[in-house]
Image: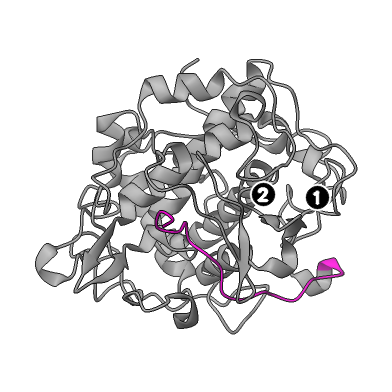
Amino acid sequence: MNSPRVPRAAAIIAVCTTLVVCGVLATPALSALRGGAPSGDVTVLVRQDVKDLTANQKAAFIGAILKAKTVPSPWDPSISYYDQFVKWHRDAFACDVGWRQSGNWAGAAHNSPTFLPWHREYLHKFDAMIQQMSGDPTMTVPYWDWTNPESTAAVFSADFMGGNGNSKQEWAVTTGPFRKGQWKITIQDPAALSKGDNPPKPYLVRNFGAFPAGAVTLPTVADVKEVLDGHRYDHAPFNGQSPLDTSFRNRLEGWREANAATCDSGWIDQSQAKGSPHVMHNVVHLYTGGVWEVGGKTSQGTMAYNTSPNDPVFFMHHANVDRIWATWELEGGNHYKPTSGAPYGYNSTDTMWPWFDRTINSWFGIERNGYRYAKLAVG
């Protein structure tokens, strides 16, 4: 029996062929040379630790997210600007945009070499959105340092993301600006993929650390140091089974003893051996959402689904993932692999689904892409 699945996708958006069809925003950084990083002088913004935000900064960030939930997406006016990010993340698990290797699969944005550059571009677009919504061109997503209890407390404070779910209300989040009744979830994983499990709720759900095999915990400083000790970016087979001694990407993503990924009803299903540890990026999703049993059926919190960006905590979590990658880059880690020979969308000079506007290698380095972190991860 496999461990509970990491979130899976439910639909696929049409492949864009032009910038106009894709709806790429005309922000300075995103309107750079197609396939290249921004040219000329670049203003470098700072992504801060959540614990260091002022009350005004917190309020402005929250306000930008809430506004984005009410504004039509420039890519798809039928959904909100915020929900566009949820949909992209969900659709990234479609088999149609994955890579099959002898019955094993690499995804378009997960359990594959693109995991880090895909989410870097994704966060870059998220920054552009909140800047537009707030009218503040210096706003950036803050990062959640999972190894620091002060940062964790700041993330889940009542004046920011709200806290753990209420056990008397099926673990619904009932505190903070994204509480039940104030924040409605409209993009979900499909019911067809729940396989008899309890369906996701239309509101935020968190059950910190809950897991059937025993509570899971957040990564430690020692865990981060161990990941940073990997000196090669990735290695064949370039998926969840890439060897950890030659795949920094897999170390950071968190796959351990991964089973061969399958295509189930059109969506990539990646799991790992029963009893194997859940670590790094993967375990933060599981810790925040939780996985537990109710009436003989499995329930999951919002962050445990492929639609995990429905919980705004997602973006601070991935900013920290990106911060660890940025630290690794500066410490001299070897650059992206594969450089060639893989299907289109995975090689360093390819563009990435669903935007096709920047090459993977144009995302190497953070300051050349207009931002840095207030403090890098431990080395």
Q: Residue at x 70, y 33 (%)?
A: 234
Q: Percent position (x, y) of residue 302?
A: 36, 63
Task: Give the x, y percent position of residue 14.
Answer: 75, 76
Looking at this view, is 249 or 76 the one in front? 249
Q: Which mark is residue 178?
A: none
Q: Amino acid at mark 1?
A: Arg
Q: Quadrant of the N terminus?
A: bottom left
For residue 345, say whether it is visible: yes
Q: Which segment is the magenta one?
A: 1-19
Q: Are the two marked residues, 2 and 1, in contact with CB atoms closer than 8 angstroms?
A: no
Give the SS element for disc 2: helix
How many circles with numbers are drawn on the protein?
2
- Indicate the secondary structure of the residue bearing disc 1: loop
Magenta-span inclusion, residue 289: no
Decide whether residue 12 is among the magenta residues. Answer: yes
Vertical order, 133 against 69 (above or below): above
| 318, 262: nearer the viewer | 262
Mark whose residue sits in front, 2 or 1: 2
Is 328 or 274 nearer to us in this picture?
A: 274
Label 2: which residue?
A: 118
* 345 vs 256, nearest the viewer: 256
Using the image, determine if residue 179 lies above or below residue 330: below
Amino acid type of disc 2? Trp
Quarter where residue 233 is shown: top right
x, y percent for residue 333: 68, 20
Relative to 21, residue 166 above or below:
above
Numbered circle sitting on residue 358: 1
